[in-house]
Amino acid sequence: LSGAVFIFFSKNRQQVKLLRWDTDGFTLYQKRLERGTFEIPYFNTGKKACVMPYKTLSAIMSGISLRSVRYRKRLN
């Protein structure tokens, strides 16, 4: 109920499922790649969870490499 999204990657990283609670039930989003793989972000295995901003999730879903991404400073 907190608005969290749970993300599950397949073993071969060609498929991802996102599970989130909507106001009256669960919503399941699924994306499967024809070619290539999704990049999995680094996370602490001791915690067994990863908290990431929406920008990072959006980059993963778009196929952008997280290692080469640099965020530019923005003016306020």
Image (tube, rainbow, N blue to C red):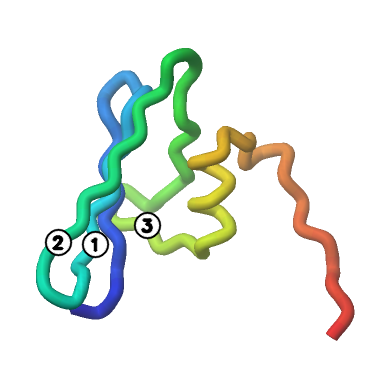
Q: Which residue is mark 3?
A: 50
Q: Quadrant of residue 40?
A: top left
Find numbered disc 1 in the image and state the secondary structure of the residue it sits on: strand
Q: Nearer the viewer, residue 56 or 22?
A: 22
Name the residue at 41% across, 50% down: 43
- Please give the label number shown on residue 20: 1
* Residue type for callout 2: Phe
Q: Earlier in the sequence, mark 3 or mark 1?
A: 1
Asked whether disc 3 touches disc 1, contact meaning CB atoms under 8 Å apart, the reply is no
The residue tagged with tag 2: helix, strand or loop?
Answer: strand
Q: Residue furthest front?
A: 24
* Residue 65 shows in this picture: yes
Mark 3 or 2, nearer chain start: 2
The residue located at (46%, 22%) in the rendering is: 37
In the image, which is nearer the foreground, mark 3 or mark 2? 2
Badge 1 amino acid: Arg
Disc 2: which residue: 26
Amino acid marked by disc 3: Cys
- SS type, badge 3: loop
The percent position of residue 29, horizontal first and vertical second, equals 28, 46
Comparing 35 with 45, the one in front is 35
- For disc 3, the neighbor class at 10 Å (few under 14, some 14 to 19, many from 20) is few
